[in-house]
Image: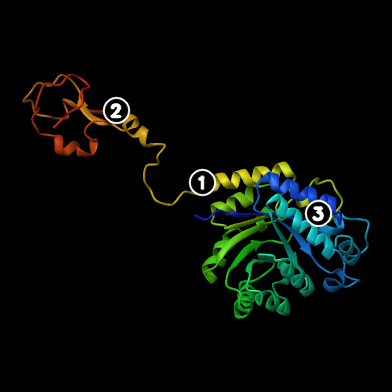
């Protein structure tokens, strides 16, 4: 089984501060994830100046009146993108970023991004999807708020424009996501419907849901994290702190090992236990040579070095080939 690709979603939890962004990269590297992901956008291109904040954003930020003001403070310029990209390369962790507009797509492509993550809000953005499709890069497609029909249309546009490798992520865009709205089973539905690899982008509190997603076959896990949940910003409160991110990665890697290869056979570690816990056919009492084996003089006991109890009926009625003491293994 291929290794699960784990993305630490820093998003905008850098609060527009490159030093915080680098601390996030350090924490992600220490946790052992495969990639850290930010968000790339030109505020003027993605939100109008009178767009209201989402309900969760109103709860987690109070210094701005609208989405535009809030997002503008979180925008990263090209120079910062490149500095973070280089810092990730130095730390040997993959830099990723979700573009929210065509200009940001072009910037990330120019920087040499290997994988493009399409956020849930862009799954119905036709020009955007065609622009990414033309890059012919690996794509992670988040499906929050989407119907199967909308996923199908997005996949068609990406493929029609040249993209081949697509993983669709089951996602719910509520921050934090209520457990009853997670719908992990939809991940399998998506995979079966479109014959694609699937993953899970998580916005729940805690780490149990992404771990369960891996057990259900997720090939990619994305999880928001922050340096400190108490910081002001739209996504901090629904994010893991560094020690929790590390716990999640450890748990996922353990689950990967536990899933195994699907073949049912004794494992290397348990081979030594077979003889100790299985049983053999033994003498229930003293048996003289020439006596007939029967339920009166045979028993089934540990250890399992001798004749298997599965041959019980085959042994019944045979003659003892020698004398046996009580509990001695029967031989043929």
Q: Is residue 47 above or below residue 207?
A: below
Residue 319's spot in the image, x, y percent? 8, 30
Residue 40's spot in the image, x, y percent? 78, 65
Q: Is residue 68 above or below residue 8?
A: below
Depth check: 192 or 19 in front?
A: 19
Is residue 44 left or right of 267 when viewed as pictured?
Answer: right
Picture residue at 55% right of the left edge, 53% below the top: 3
Is residue 171 left or right of 329 when viewed as pictured?
Answer: right
Which picture quadrant has residue 197?
A: bottom right
Give the CA distance from mark 1 to mark 3: 32 Å
Q: Quadrant of the C terminus?
A: top left
Say whether disc 1 or disc 2 marks the residue closer to the N-terminus. 1
Give the CA distance from mark 1 to mark 2: 31 Å
Cβ–Cβ under 8 Å for marks 3 and 2: no
Say whether disc 1 or disc 3 marks the residue closer to the N-terminus. 3
* Residue at disc 2, secondary structure: loop
Q: Which residue is mark 1?
A: 257
Q: Which residue is mark 3?
A: 13
Mark 1 vs mark 2, foreground winner is: 1
Which picture quadrant has residue 175?
A: bottom right
Dot label at residue 303: 2
Is residue 176 left or right of 61 when viewed as pictured?
Answer: left
Which picture quadrant has residue 312?
A: top left
């Amino acid at each position: 089984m291929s290794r699960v690709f784990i993305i630490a979603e820093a998003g905008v939890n850098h609060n527009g501060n490159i030093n915080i962004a680098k601390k996030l990269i350090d924490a992600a590297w220490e946790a052992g994830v495969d990639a850290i992901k930010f968000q790339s956008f030109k505020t003027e291109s993605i939100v109008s100046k009178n767009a209201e904040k989402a309900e969760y954003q109103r709860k987690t930020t109070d210094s701005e009146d609208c989405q535009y003001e809030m997002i503008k403070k979180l925008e990263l310029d090209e120079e910062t993108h490149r500095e973070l990209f280089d810092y990730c390369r130095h730390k040997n962790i993959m830099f990723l970023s979700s573009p929210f507009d065509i200009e940001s797509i072009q910037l990330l492509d120019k920087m040499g991004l290997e994988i493009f993550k399409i956020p849930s809000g862009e799954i119905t953005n036709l020009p955007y999807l065609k622009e990414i499709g033309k890059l012919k890069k690996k794509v992670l497609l988040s499906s929050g708020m989407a119907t199967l029909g909308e996923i199908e249309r997005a996949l068609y546009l990406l493929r029609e424009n040249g993209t081949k490798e697509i993983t669709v992520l089951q996602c719910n865009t509520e921050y934090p996501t209520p457990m009853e709205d997670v719908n992990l089973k939809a991940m399998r539905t998506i995979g079966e419907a479109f014959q694609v690899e699937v993953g899970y982008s998580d916005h729940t509190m805690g780490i149990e849901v992404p771990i369960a997603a891996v057990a259900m076959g997720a090939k990619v896990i994305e999880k928001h994290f922050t340096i400190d949940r108490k910081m002001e910003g739209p996504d901090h409160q629904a994010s893991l702190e560094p020690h929790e991110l590390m716990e999640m990665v450890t748990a996922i890697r353990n689950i990967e090992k536990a899933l195994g290869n699907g073949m049912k056979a004794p494992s290397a570690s348990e081979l030594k236990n077979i003889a100790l816990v299985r049983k053999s056919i033994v003498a229930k009492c003293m048996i003289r040579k020439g006596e007939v084996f029967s339920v009166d003089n045979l028993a089934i006991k540990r250890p399992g070095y001798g004749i298997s109890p599965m041959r019980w009926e085959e042994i019944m009625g045979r003659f003892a080939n020698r004398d046996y003491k009580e509990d001695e293994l029967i031989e043929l």
